[in-house]
Image (tube, rainbow, N blue to C red):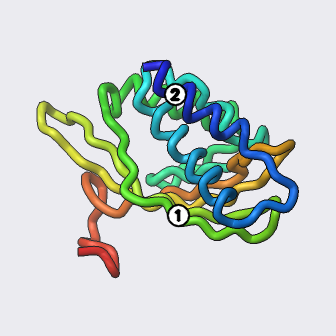
Amino acid sequence: TTAAVIPALAAVVSSSSAQASPQPEEAAIRAVFDAFNASWNTHGMPGFERLFTPDADFVMITGKLLRGRDEIVAYHRDLLKGVYAGSRQFIERVTVRVIDDRNAVAHAEWGADFTANGQSVRRTAMGTATLRKVEGRWLIPTLQNTLTGGPGYAFGQPAGRP
């Protein structure tokens, strides 16, 4: 529901601190991914556009490069009308490395459950994102999403995964 998206987005918007310690910054960065997840799981993906810088790049699990926030948002909203219609995204873990007070890197182990050809399907991925603090908000300028399991993954389990 839209009500679930609002608190996650509020956490993203209110994450400001000039000389913050890594722990609060890590929580604010994790909130970006929580907002991503909440948006995906809400009809119409409300607030999704608020997670990216205007010039963001997003490499999809298929290798397709999306350039700019508008293209990223439009593509994802179309995905949720097509192959991922009715899907539920989940996050297993987000690890964060704060580089300085304006830059960070995060790795999101996440995936989506959906129905394809009448069968329940789970697809997992590792998203690697850079994040930049802009006017007190952590935003995503780059995200590379790498498929780690499910349809389309041809190489078995990735190293380090059971």
Q: Confirm whether residue 72 shows in the render.
A: yes
Local packing at callout 1 (Cα closer than 10 Å; few below 14, some 14-19, many 20+) is: many
User: Quick one: which residue is furthest to the bottom in this view?
Assistant: 159
**158 sits to left or right of 80:** left
At 64% across and 32% down in the image, what residue appears?
10
Q: Confirm whether residue 146 shows in the render.
A: no
Quadrant in the picture for residue 124: bottom left
**Where the C terminus falls, by quadrant?**
bottom left
In the drawing, what numbered circle is on residue 107? 1
In the drawing, what numbered circle is on residue 33? none
Quadrant in the picture for residue 115: top left
At 45% across and 54% down in the image, what residue appears?
61
Horizontal and vertical percent for residue 33?
54, 47
Horizontal and vertical percent for residue 44?
49, 19
| Residue at image mark 2 | 5
Considering only order in the chain, which callout, 2 or 1, is on the residue closer to the N terminus? 2
Tags 1 and 2 touching, CB below 8 Å = no
Horizontal and vertical percent for residue 89?
37, 41
Q: In the displayed structure, would residue 111 be above or below residue 36?
A: below
Q: Amino acid at mark 1?
A: His
Local packing at callout 2 (Cα closer than 10 Å; few below 14, some 14-19, many 20+) is: many
**71 sits to left or right of 125:** right
Q: In the displayed structure, would residue 42 be above or below residue 152?
A: above
Element class at badge 2: helix
- Calculate the distance from the C-alpha at mark 1 to the C-alpha at mark 2: 21 Å
Closest to the observer, 90 or 77: 90
Closest to the observer, 43 or 12: 12
**Where the N terminus falls, by quadrant?**
top left
Q: Amino acid at mark 2?
A: Val
**21 sits to left or right of 4:** right
Element class at badge 1: strand
